[in-house]
C-alpha cells in the first residue's frame, strides 16, 4: 500500500451570503464538477451548524474540521474571519487524517483568496452603490479574473506533488 | 467472555454453609450489591477514578477451581479479586482447635490460587471480642486489618449493619484490581515495546490490551476502556502501514451472512476466538473493533459519535473493500454498507432511548442518522445504476465510485451472493427497487428536516424528483440547472409548447448566456445545436402564441444607441436612429421588429422601429425609423425586440434614477433630433389685429382668436387632424374656426379637432380659431397634437405632439403722461417693449370718437419714422368746453422685429428665386441658415433699426448653389431701406384712452421783480442779483376750471393754498410763504415775497405747491369734497443768475439792504454766534414765521479743514462767504469745535482780507490795515503762535496734531506757500512722533484720518510711526489703523 496522501478533489469558496465564488475541481472526470457543486451546497448546512456551535462556545476557530463524508470524499470546512467559507473535498482514505494537515491546506487556500480579493481592480467596473456588496469577492471567482483560479490550482498542484508528513514522523497517541 | 461482575469467592466451614443461618447471611449479603461509588486511587495514575457502580458475583470458592486452564489473558476480573471466609465461632477454644486451622488452610489455598490475590477476611459472626482479636492477630500479617465482625441482626437489609463489611469489600476489591491492573499494564507495555521484534503478534497484543479494556468496562470505567480501544485502533493502523499483516487472514473472507448482519453486534461472530486463532480477517477485525468502540460509546451515551464513527467507517472501509470487488460477491460492499447503515440507525435508536438529549444534540443526532440513511441510499444508487434500474446520469451517478481501470466484467462473477433480502428483491424487481429507494430517501429527508439541514434535504428531494421523472418518462437527459431540468421535464411531459414553455426556455437562455450555462449543459453532447434547436423552436412557439408576451430584461439581447445624432429621413418626414443590437446567443435570431422608445421634454415619446431583420451573433447595427419626429433632445427610455408575439423589453433604469439624483456618471443616453424644415409643421400665432377688449365697450362680442398655420412642407396631405388644448384652461371654439385666405384645402370641423384635407406640398393653410378669454395670461401655452397622412404613404399615420406658446399680452407697454396748459392738453404716449423681443412701431394715431370730433381736436405733433423698440408720441388736444366723456382711441401699428425680419428674408428670397429658379429647392434651407445666423448674434439689430441694412453676422461660407444663394441673399438684405418697410404684415392694436379730467388747473408763477412795488404786469427787468441781497419777487397763481368734468356744476370758486417750497440750500424766503386764497375760473392771484439767495450761481427759483382745500359749507365740486387740482409751474425751467457779493458792490445795494447788512456785521463783533444774531435781526425785521433750523447745515460743501479756504481748489474765486457759513463746521466734531470757537472768526476774516485782491488788488494793504484796526475781534486774540511766537498775521496753517503746542504757524515760518497741503504736521510734532509718542492720542488721530481721507504725505508719516511704535499701540487703535490703511488705495 502506498503511503496515504491527502488528495484534494475539489475546493469551493462560498461568500458570506452563500453565493459560490469559485468551485474548482481537481479530479479528472469533468462530470464530477456537478458533484462538487452538490457537495459544496450541502456542506453549507453543516458549516452553519458548526458556526452556530462555535458562536455558542465563543470560539473563534476558523477550522470547522470534518463536515461529513460522502461516498469517496471527506468534506472539510473552514470559515474565514469575514465569513467566507472554504470547503474542500479530500479523497476519502481508510486512514486517519490529521487535522493539522488539513488546516495547512486551508491556510494556503485562505491566503490565495486574500491575495486575489485584495486586487483593487475587481471593483473597477462595479457601481459604487452599497458599501457592503460582495461584488468584488464574487468577481474574484469569475472567469474574467484568472489570478484566483491560478492560485487555487497551485495549491492543488502542490498537494498532489507532496505526500503528507512522512510516516516516520507520524505519531499516534 | 467476561461478565461485567467482579468475582468474589466465599468459603466457610461446611457445617456453617449447610445451616439456615448461612442462607440468611448469603441473601443479606447479596442485597448489598452492587457496590456503589468506589474511588480508585492508583499510584500509577494521576487522578482518582470514580467508579460509580460495580456488581459483585459472589461464588463459592470451589466452583472456580478447575476453570483457569487457559493461558489467554482474560479480563482482570475473570479471576476473583476477593476471597471471603465466613467464620462462626463463639468461643476461643473452638477457634483454637478447629477454626484457626480451617482459616489457615483456606488462606493457603487462596494464596496459592492467586498469589497476588487478596486474602479474604476472617469473619466472626456473633462472636466475642476475644476471638476476633485472636483471628486478627493470626491473620493480619501485613498491618492490614482484614477481619471484620458482623453483628448479625434480623434486619439484614439495614445497610448500617453491613457498612463495615462493604467498605472492606470495596477496599479489598480496589486494592486487588489495582495490583492486577498494574501488572497487566506492565505486560502490555512490554508487549508493545517488542513490536518490531520478529515473532511479535498483533493479535496476542490485541487480546492482552483488550483485556485491560474489558476490565475497565467491567469496572464501569468506559472512558478508560474506550481509550484503550482507540489506542488499539491506532496501533492497528500503524501496523497496517508497516504492512506487518502476516498474522491476519485475508482482508475479508466473506461469510454468507456477512453483508446483512448488524454491524454493531460484537457477538455475531466468535471474534475473540478468531483473533486468538490468528485467523480473523481484517474485515472482521475492523468490524469488531468498531462494534466494541460503539458499544462503549453507547454506554457513555454518545450515540451521535457512534453514528459518526459508523459513517466514517462504512464509507472508508467500504471504499477499501471495493478494491477487492472481483473477489467478493456481487454487490457485497453495497449490501454490507446498506444493511450496516440501517442496522446502525436501528441500534442507535434503541440506545438513544435511554439518553436525554438537548435540542441541538437531537438535531445533530438526526443529521448523522440522515447521513447514514443517505449512505444507504447511495448504495442503492450504485446498485440501481449497475443493474440498470437507474440511468447513469447525475444525480444518481454522483454516488458512483470512480471507475477502476480494470474492468470487472471480464472476470467471472465471484461466487456467493449477498444475503440482504430486500436488496435481492430490489435487484430483480424494478418496482421494489423504486419503492425501497423512495422509502430510504424519505426517511433521510425526514431526518434531515428534523436536523434543520435544508440543503441536504433539498438534494435528496432532487433525487426524488429525478427518480419520479425517470420513472414517469424514462427520460434520458438530465440537467442539473433548474431551468434546463424544467425544460426537459416539460419536453418529456409532452406538454404543448405554450407560454409556460417559452418562459422556461427564456430562463434557460438567460442562464446560458450568463456564462454559467455552458458548464451546466455538460451532458448535452452538442451544446450549440441544442441551443440553436431550442431557439428555433422558441421562435416557432412564439408564432403560435395567442396573446402578446412581454419578457423584461432578458440578457440574451441588448440594445444600445450607436450614434447620438439622429439623421433625418430626407425623402419623407421622420428620423433615422442607428442602434446596435447585441445578440449573445450562439445563433442567428430573426426578429420581427426592433423598437426604441425615446422620451423627451415633458414626456414626449417617440417610437423608432425597424421591420423584420436577422440578428447575427454579436453586434448588429440596425437603423430604426420614426415616421413622426419632433426636434429636440431625447433619452432612450425603453427598447424592445419583437419576435411575433413575444416581446423582449429593456427599460433604461438610469432614466428613472436620473430624475431623482442625477450623477454625472449615470446620465442616460441622449440623442438629438435635428429640426426637419421640410416636414409638416403647425405654427400658431396671434392675429394681426387685436384690441384691448377689457376696456372697449362697443366692440365686445368679437372674441380673441389665434391663427393656426399648417405648413405642409414636402408632404401632399391627404388629411391632417389638429387637436389643440391649453393646460391653462382656455377653451378653443372649434366650431367657429375659419379658413383664412383661399386655397384648395378643405376644413372639417369636429368637436375638438380641426381636420384639413387635400393640401398640396409647400403650401400654408391658415385657420383662425377663436378662443375664450386669455388676457390674464402673459403667454398662452397650447399643446398641439397632429395626425396626418400623406398621399405618398397613405397607410402611415404620422403623429406629432408639441407645445406652442402664443403671447397673449401686448408685446409693448404704453405709458401716458398728460400736461395741461390752459385749454390745451398735451398727451405723451411712450411705447416700449415689454419683452426681450424687439418691436417695430410704425405709427401711432390718436383718434376721437365720432361724436366728439367737434369738441376735441387732436393734433399729432410730428410724424415719426418707424422705430425699433420705443417711440414717443405727443398729441395736442384742444377741447371746447362741454366735451363728452367718450374715450379717445390710440391706434398703434407695430410688428415684432423678428416677424419683420423673417418676412424681409422671405421677400428677399422670393426675389432671388424669381431670378434663379434653380435655387428653389434650397429656399427653406437658405432661410433657415440665415435665421440661425441672425438668432445667434444680436449685433445686427442696431444697424438694422436705424438704416434698415440687415447685415447677417458670421454666416458660414459654403460652396455650390447654397453658397451662391446665401451670398445673394446677404446682398439683398444688406441694402439700405430708407424709412419704408412695405413688406410684411403690420399688426394693429387699439387702446382706448380717456380724456383726463381735472377740476382745477393752476398755473403758478414766481417772478423776480426789480422792486416790490413793480406791478405784476411789468416786464421782467434783468437786474443784477447778488447773493445775500433781498430780491423781491411776485407769486402769481392763475386758475382755470376748463378741464373740470361736465357733470359737475361750474364751480364758483374754491379755496386754494399755495406753498413756496423751501430750498434751504439756495434761498431764504421772506414774506407770505404760505397763504390761502379764493380761486375762480380764469382769475389770477398775486402775492409779493422777498427772496435772499444764500450763495451765488445759477439758481432755480423755488417751486410753488398748490393744494385745494376742502370747501366749506358742504361739497360743491361733485361728490368729493376736495377737488382735484393740478399745478403747472410756469417758472419751472427758469433760473436766475446770482452774482457773488463783492466788497465794493455793497454800495450799490438799496439802502434797506445795506442797513440790514450793517446790522449783521455789527452782530459779528458783538456776539460770539453771528448766526443767531443774524437770525434774530432777520426775524425781527421781516417776521419770518419759521426759520430754517440750521441754515448753514446744507450750505455748500462742509468745510473740512480749519484752514480758511473752503473752496481752495477753486483758486481764482475767493468767495466772500458770509460769516454764518464759515461758522458752520463748528457743528461738526467736538474736537474741532474747540479750535473753531476760539479761532475761526479771526482766521476767516483774515482770509476775507487776503481774498480781497481778487477784486481790487491795489487796495489790499489799506484794507488789511483798515480792517485790522476796525476789528475788535482781532484785539482779543493776543495769543502767540508759531515757532516764532508772534501774534497771528497773514495766512496761517494749523498743525494737524490736535495736541500741538503751537497750533498755528505763519506760512513763511514753515516754508510753505499756497496752495497748502490738506494735511500737515509741524516739525515739532513730527519729531515728537518719531520719538516718544506717549502723549499722542492715537485713536483720535486715526479717526481724523479716516474722516478726512488720508493724503499721501501724512500716510507716510503714519506708516513710519506705526512701524516704530507698533508694540505700544493699543489693539483697538491698531485695528482702526488697519481699517484706515486697508481702505486707502496702495501708494
Image (tube, rainbow, N blue to C red):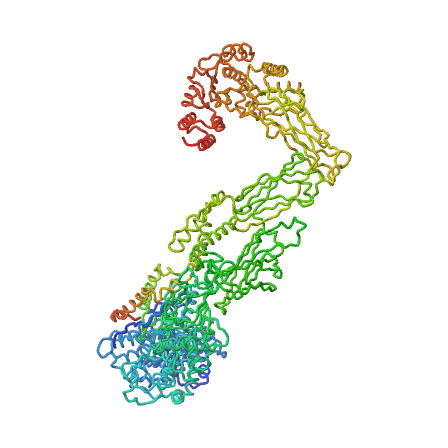
Q: Quadrant of the C terminus of chain B?
A: top left
Looking at the picture, tell me which residue is in the foreground, B1298 or B977: B977
Is B1283 located above or below residue B10 in the figure? above
Looking at the picture, tell me which residue is in the foreground, B971 or B727: B971
Q: Quadrant of the N terminus of chain B?
A: bottom left
Picture coordinates of residue B317 (x, y %)? 33, 79
> Residue B108 sits in which quadrant?
bottom left
Q: Is residue B1130 left or right of residue B964?
A: right
Picture coordinates of residue B1079 (x, y %)? 72, 31
The extreme left residue here reads B198
> Residue B10 sits in which quadrant?
bottom left
Looking at the picture, tell me which residue is in the foreground, B475 or B13: B475
Q: Would residue B899 be visible to someone looking at this image?
A: yes
Is B1156 located above or below residue B812 in the figure? above
Q: Would residue B95 be visible to someone looking at this image?
A: no
> Residue B309 sits in which quadrant?
bottom left
Picture coordinates of residue B86 (x, y %)? 40, 80
Is B935 located above or below residue B360 in the figure? above
Q: Is residue B1237 left or right of residue B494?
A: right
Q: How many marks?
A: 0
Picture coordinates of residue B1344 (x, y %)? 49, 26
Amino acid at each position: 500500500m502506498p503511503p496515504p496522501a491527502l488528495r484534494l478533489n475539489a475546493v469551493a469558496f462560498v461568500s458570506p451570503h452563500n453565493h459560490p465564488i469559485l468551485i474548482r475541481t481537481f479530479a479528472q472526470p469533468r462530470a464530477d464538477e456537478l458533484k462538487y457543486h452538490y457537495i459544496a451546497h450541502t456542506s453549507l448546512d453543516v458549516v452553519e451548524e458548526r458556526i452556530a456551535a462555535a458562536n455558542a462556545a465563543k470560539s473563534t476557530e476558523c477550522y470547522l474540521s470534518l463536515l461529513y463524508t460522502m461516498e469517496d470524499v471527506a468534506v472539510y470546512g473552514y470559515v474565514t474571519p469575514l465569513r467566507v467559507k472554504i470547503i474542500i473535498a479530500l479523497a476519502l482514505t481508510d486512514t486517519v487524517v490529521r487535522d493539522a494537515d488539513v488546516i495547512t491546506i486551508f491556510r494556503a487556500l485562505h491566503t490565495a483568496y486574500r491575495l486575489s480579493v485584495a486586487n483593487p481592480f475587481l471593483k473597477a467596473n462595479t457601481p459604487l452603490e452599497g458599501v457592503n456588496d460582495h461584488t468584488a469577492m464574487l468577481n474574484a471567482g469569475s472567469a474574467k479574473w484568472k489570478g484566483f483560479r491560478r492560485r487555487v490550482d497551485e495549491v492543488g498542484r502542490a498537494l498532489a506533488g507532496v505526500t503528507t508528513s512522512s510516516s516516520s514522523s507520524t505519531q499516534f497517541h | 467472555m467476561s461478565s461485567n461482575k467482579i468475582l468474589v469467592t466465599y468459603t466457610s466451614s461446611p457445617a456453617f454453609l449447610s445451616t439456615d443461618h448461612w442462607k440468611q447471611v448469603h441473601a443479606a449479603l447479596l442485597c448489598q450489591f452492587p457496590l456503589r461509588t468506589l474511588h480508585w486511587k492508583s499510584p500509577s495514575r494521576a487522578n482518582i477514578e470514580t467508579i460509580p457502580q460495580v456488581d459483585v458475583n459472589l461464588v463459592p470458592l470451589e466452583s472456580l477451581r478447575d476453570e483457569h486452564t487457559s493461558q489467554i489473558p482474560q479480563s482482570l476480573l475473570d479471576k476473583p479479586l476477593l476471597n471471603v471466609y465466613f467464620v462462626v465461632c463463639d468461643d476461643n477454644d473452638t477457634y483454637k482447635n478447629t477454626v484457626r486451622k480451617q482459616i489457615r488452610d483456606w488462606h493457603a489455598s487462596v494464596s496459592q490460587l492467586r498469589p497476588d490475590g487478596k486474602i479474604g477476611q476472617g469473619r466472626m459472626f456473633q462472636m466475642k471480642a476475644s476471638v476476633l482479636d485472636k483471628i486478627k492477630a493470626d491473620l493480619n500479617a501485613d498491618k492490614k486489618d482484614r477481619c471484620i465482625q458482623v453483628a448479625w441482626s434480623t434486619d439484614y437489609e439495614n445497610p448500617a449493619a453491613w457498612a463495615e463489611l462493604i467498605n472492606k469489600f470495596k477496599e479489598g476489591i480496589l486494592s486487588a484490581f489495582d495490583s492486577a491492573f498494574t501488572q497487566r499494564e506492565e505486560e502490555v507495555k512490554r508487549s508493545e515495546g517488542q513490536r518490531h521484534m520478529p515473532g511479535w503478534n498483533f493479535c496476542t497484543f490485541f487480546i492482552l490490551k483488550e483485556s485491560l479494556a474489558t476490565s475497565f468496562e467491567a469496572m464501569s470505567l468506559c472512558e478508560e476502556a474506550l481509550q484503550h480501544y482507540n489506542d488499539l485502533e491506532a496501533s492497528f493502523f500503524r501496523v497496517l502501514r508497516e504492512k506487518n499483516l502476516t498474522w491476519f487472514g485475508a482482508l475479508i473472507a466473506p461469510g454468507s451472512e456477512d453483508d446483512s448482519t448488524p454491524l454493531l453486534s460484537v457477538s455475531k461472530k466468535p471474534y475473540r476466538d478468531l483473533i486468538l486463532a490468528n485467523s480473523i480477517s481484517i474485515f472482521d477485525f475492523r468490524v469488531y473493533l468498531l462494534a466494541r468502540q460503539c458499544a462503549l460509546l453507547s454506554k457513555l451515551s454518545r450515540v451521535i459519535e457512534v453514528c459518526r464513527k459508523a459513517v466514517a467507517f462504512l464509507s472508508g472501509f467500504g471504499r477499501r473493500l471495493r478494491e477487492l470487488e472481483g473477489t467478493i460477491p456481487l454487490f457485497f460492499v453495497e449490501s454490507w454498507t446498506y444493511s450496516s447503515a440501517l442496522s446502525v440507525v436501528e441500534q442507535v435508536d434503541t440506545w438513544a432511548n435511554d439518553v436525554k438529549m438537548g435540542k441541538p444534540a437531537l438535531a445533530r443526532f438526526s443529521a448523522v442518522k440522515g447521513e447514514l440513511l443517505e449512505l444507504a441510499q447511495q448504495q442503492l444508487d450504485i446498485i440501481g445504476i449497475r443493474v440498470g434500474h437507474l440511468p447513469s446520469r447525475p444525480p444518481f451517478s454522483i454516488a458512483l465510485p470512480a471507475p477502476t481501470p480494470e474492468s470487472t466484467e471480464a472476470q467471472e462473477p465471484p461466487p456467493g451472493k449477498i444475503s440482504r433480502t430486500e436488496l435481492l428483491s430490489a435487484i430483480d424487481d424494478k418496482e421494489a427497487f423504486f419503492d425501497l429507494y423512495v422509502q430510504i430517501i424519505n426517511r433521510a429527508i425526514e431526518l434531515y428536516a428534523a436536523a434543520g439541514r435544508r440543503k441536504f434535504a433539498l438534494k435528496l428531494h432532487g433525487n426524488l424528483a429525478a427518480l419520479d421523472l425517470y420513472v414517469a418518462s424514462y427520460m434520458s437527459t438530465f440537467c442539473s440547472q433548474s431551468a434546463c431540468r424544467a425544460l426537459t421535464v416539460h419536453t418529456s411531459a409532452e406538454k404543448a409548447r405554450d407560454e409556460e414553455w417559452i418562459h422556461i426556455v427564456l430562463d434557460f437562455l438567460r442562464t446560458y448566456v450568463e456564462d454559467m450555462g455552458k458548464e451546466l449543459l455538460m451532458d448535452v453532447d452538442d451544446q450549440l445545436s441544442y441551443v440553436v434547436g431550442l431557439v428555433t423552436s422558441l421562435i416557432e412557439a412564439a408564432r403560435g402564441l395567442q396573446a402578446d408576451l412581454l419578457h423584461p430584461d432578458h440578457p440574451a439581447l441588448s440594445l444600445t444607441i450607436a450614434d447620438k445624432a439622429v439623421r433625418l429621413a430626407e425623402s419623407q418626414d421622420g428620423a433615422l436612429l442607428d442602434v446596435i443590437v447585441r445578440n449573445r446567443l450562439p445563433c442567428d435570431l430573426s426578429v420581427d421588429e426592433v423598437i426604441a422608445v425615446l422620451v423627451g421634454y415633458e414626456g414626449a415619446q417617440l417610437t423608432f422601429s425597424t421591420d423584420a431583420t436577422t440578428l447575427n451573433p454579436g453586434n448588429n447595427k440596425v437603423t430604426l425609423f420614426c415616421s413622426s419626429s419632433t426636434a429636440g433632445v431625447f433619452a432612450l427610455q425603453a427598447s424592445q425586440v419583437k419576435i411575433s408575439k413575444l416581446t423582449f423589453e429593456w427599460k433604461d433604469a438610469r432614466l428613472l434614477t436620473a430624475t431623482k439624483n442625477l450623477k454625472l456618471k449615470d446620465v442616460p443616453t441622449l440623442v438629438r433630433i435635428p429640426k426637419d424644415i421640410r416636414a409638416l409643421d403647425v405654427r400658431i400665432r396671434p392675429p394681426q389685429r387685436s384690441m384691448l377688449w377689457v376696456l372697449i365697450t362697443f366692440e365686445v362680442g368679437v372674441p380673441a382668436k389665434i391663427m393656426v398655420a399648417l405648413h405642409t412642407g414636402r408632404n401632399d396631405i391627404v388629411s391632417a387632424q389638429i387637436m389643440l388644448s391649453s393646460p391653462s384652461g382656455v377653451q378653443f371654439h372649434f366650431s367657429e374656426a375659419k379658413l383664412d385666405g383661399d386655397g384648395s384645402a378643405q376644413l372639417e370641423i369636429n368637436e375638438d379637432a380641426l381636420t384639413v384635407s387635400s393640401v398640396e406640398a409647400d403650401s400654408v393653410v391658415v385657420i383662425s380659431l377663436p378662443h375664450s378669454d386669455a388676457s390674464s395670461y402673459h403667454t398662452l401655452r397650447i399643446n398641439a397634437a397632429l395626425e396626418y397622412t400623406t398621399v405618398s404613404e397613405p397607410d402611415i399615420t404620422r403623429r406629432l405632439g408639441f407645445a406652442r406658446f402664443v403671447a397673449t399680452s401686448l408685446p409693448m407697454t404704453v405709458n401716458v403722461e398728460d400736461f395741461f396748459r390752459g385749454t390745451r392738453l398735451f398727451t405723451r404716449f411712450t411705447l416700449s417693449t415689454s419683452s426681450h423681443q424687439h418691436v417695430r412701431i410704425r405709427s401711432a394715431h390718436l383718434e376721437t370718437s365720432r361724436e366728439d370730433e367737434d369738441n376735441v381736436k387732436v393734433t399729432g405733433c410730428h410724424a415719426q419714422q418707424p422705430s425699433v423698440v420705443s417711440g414717443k408720441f405727443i398729441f395736442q388736444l384742444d377741447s371746447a368746453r362741454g366735451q363728452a366723456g367718450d374715450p379717445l382711441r390710440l391706434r398703434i401699428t407695430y410688428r415684432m422685429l423678428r416677424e419683420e425680419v423673417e418676412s424681409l428674408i422671405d421677400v428677399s428670397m422670393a426675389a432671388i428665386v424669381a431670378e434663379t429658379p434653380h435655387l428653389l429647392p434650397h429656399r427653406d434651407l437658405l432661410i433657415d441658415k440665415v435665421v440661425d445666423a441672425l438668432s445667434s448674434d444680436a449685433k445686427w439689430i442696431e444697424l438694422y433699426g436705424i438704416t434698415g441694412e440687415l447685415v447677417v453676422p458670421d454666416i458660414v461660407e459654403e460652396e455650390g448653389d447654397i453658397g451662391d444663394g446665401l451670398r445673394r441673399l446677404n446682398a439683398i438684405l444688406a441694402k439700405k431701406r430708407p424709412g419704408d418697410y412695405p413688406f410684411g404684415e403690420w399688426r394693429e392694436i387699439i387702446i382706448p384712452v380717456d380724456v383726463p379730467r381735472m377740476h382745477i388747473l393752476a398755473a403758478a408763477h414766481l417772478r423776480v421783480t426789480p422792486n416790490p412795488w413793480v406791478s405784476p404786469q411789468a416786464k421782467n427787468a434783468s437786474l443784477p442779483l447778488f447773493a445775500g441781497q433781498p430780491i423781491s419777487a411776485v407769486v402769481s397763481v392763475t386758475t382755470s376750471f376748463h378741464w373740470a368734468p361736465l357733470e359737475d356744476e361750474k364751480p364758483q370758486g374754491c379755496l386754494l393754498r399755495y406753498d413756496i417750497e423751501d430750498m434751504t440750500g439756495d434761498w431764504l424766503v421772506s414774506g407770505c410763504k404760505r397763504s390761502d386764497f379764493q380761486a375762480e375760473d380764469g382769475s389770477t392771484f398775486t402775492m409779493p415775497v422777498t427772496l435772499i439767495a444764500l450763495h451765488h450761481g445759477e439758481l432755480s427759483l423755488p417751486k410753488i405747491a398748490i393744494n385745494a382745500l376742502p370747501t366749506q359749507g358742504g361739497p360743491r365740486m361733485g361728490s368729493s369734497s376736495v377737488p382735484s387740482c393740478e399745478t403747472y409751474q410756469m417758472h419751472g425751467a427758469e433760473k436766475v443768475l446770482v452774482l457773488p457779493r463783492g466788497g465794493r458792490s455793497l454800495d450799490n445795494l438799496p439802502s434797506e439792504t445795506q442797513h440790514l447788512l450793517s446790522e449783521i456785521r455789527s452782530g459779528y463783533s458783538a456776539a460770539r454766534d453771528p448766526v443767531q444774531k443774524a437770525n434774530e435781526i432777520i426775524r425781527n425785521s421781516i417776521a419770518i414765521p419759521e426759520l430754517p433750523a440750521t441754515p448753514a447745515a446744507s450750505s455748500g460743501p462742509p468745510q473740512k479743514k480749519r484752514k480758511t479756504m473752503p473752496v481752495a481748489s477753486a483758486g481764482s474765486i475767493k468767495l466772500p462767504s458770509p460769516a454764518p457759513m464759515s461758522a458752520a463746521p463748528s457743528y461738526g466734531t467736538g474736537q474741532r469745535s474747540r479750535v473753531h470757537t476760539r479761532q475761526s472768526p479771526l482766521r476767516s476774516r483774515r482770509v476775507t482780507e487776503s481774498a480781497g485782491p481778487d477784486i481790487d488788488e491795489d487796495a489790499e494793504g489799506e484794507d488789511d490795515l483798515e480792517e485790522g484796526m476796525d476789528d475788535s475781534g482781532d484785539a482779543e486774540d493776543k495769543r502767540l503762535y508759531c515757532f516764532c511766537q508772534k501774534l497771528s498775521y497773514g495766512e496761517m496753517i494749523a498743525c494737524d496734531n490736535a495736541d500741538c503746542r503751537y497750533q498755528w504757524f505763519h506760512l513763511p515760518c514753515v516754508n510753505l506757500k499756497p496752495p497748502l497741503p490738506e494735511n500737515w504736521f509741524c516739525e515739532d510734532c513730527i519729531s515728537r512722533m518719531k520719538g516718544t509718542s506717549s502723549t499722542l492720542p492715537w485713536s483720535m488721530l486715526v479717526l481724523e484720518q479716516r474722516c478726512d481721507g488720508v493724503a499721501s504725505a501724512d500716510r507716510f508719516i503714519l506708516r513710519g510711526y506705526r512701524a516704530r511704535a507698533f508694540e505700544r499701540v493699543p489693539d483697538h487703535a491698531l485695528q482702526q489703523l488697519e481699517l484706515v490703511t486697508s481702505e486707502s488705495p496702495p501708494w
